[in-house]
Image (tube, rainbow, N blue to C red):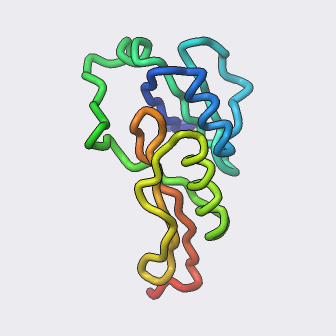
Amino acid sequence: MTKEIWLNLPVKDIPQTTSFFTKIGFKLNEHAPKSDSMASFKIGQKDFIVNFFTEAVFNSFTPFQIADLTNATECLISIDAENKEDVDNILKKAEEAGGNVFATGGERDGWMYGGGFTDLDGHKWNVLFMDFSKFSQ
């Protein structure tokens, strides 16, 4: 049985990545090694771990080519927000830190509110508040 799941992403510059994600409110994973080739963050109440590795290190993990994310995505990484204001706040912080907001905060299907941003390396992030009391069964 598995114990945990974490996400590993390739990035071009660890100090810039560390600065970006610290500015939007992610907390550094104090249990991970600190180096010029890796940064680790804990996200959310359950401390989901996201590790960022330089492209050179990431390439050593897999025989596959790193995707060019300029006009593509490998996945949409979703963050659960406490409320609509948190969605808008995270999007604002991401833009102020140098990211690109590709979807401003807005309602969807009457029970979701969300938006999205692209980080400095092109990874796509979705920030979403879900009001399940408004969800029709």
In the rendered image, the vertical position of residue 69 relative to residue 54, given as above or below: below
Residue 114, position as x, y percentages in the image: 50, 66
- Identify the residue shown where x is 25% and y is 22%: 65
**Residue closer to the observer: 86 or 5:** 86
Task: Work out which quarter of the rendered image holds the C terminus and state it.
Answer: bottom left
- Identify the residue shown where x is 46% and y is 47%: 100
Residue 102, position as x, y percentages in the image: 41, 55
Q: Quadrant of residue 108?
A: bottom left
Q: Residue furthest right?
A: 30
Whether residue 94 sits left or right of residue 46 in the image: it is: left
Residue 92, position as x, y percentages in the image: 60, 54
Whether residue 62 sits left or right of residue 33 in the image: it is: left
Q: Quadrant of residue 68?
A: top left
In the rendered image, the vertical position of residue 82 relative to residue 133, given as above or below: above
Q: Quadrant of residue 81?
A: bottom right
Q: How many marks on residues?
A: 0
In the rendered image, the vertical position of residue 85 relative to residue 91, given as above or below: below
In the rendered image, the vertical position of residue 81 relative to residue 41, given as above or below: below
- Identify the residue shown where x is 68% and y is 44%: 25
**Residue closer to the observer: 62 or 99:** 99
- Identify the residue shown where x is 62% and y is 70%: 84
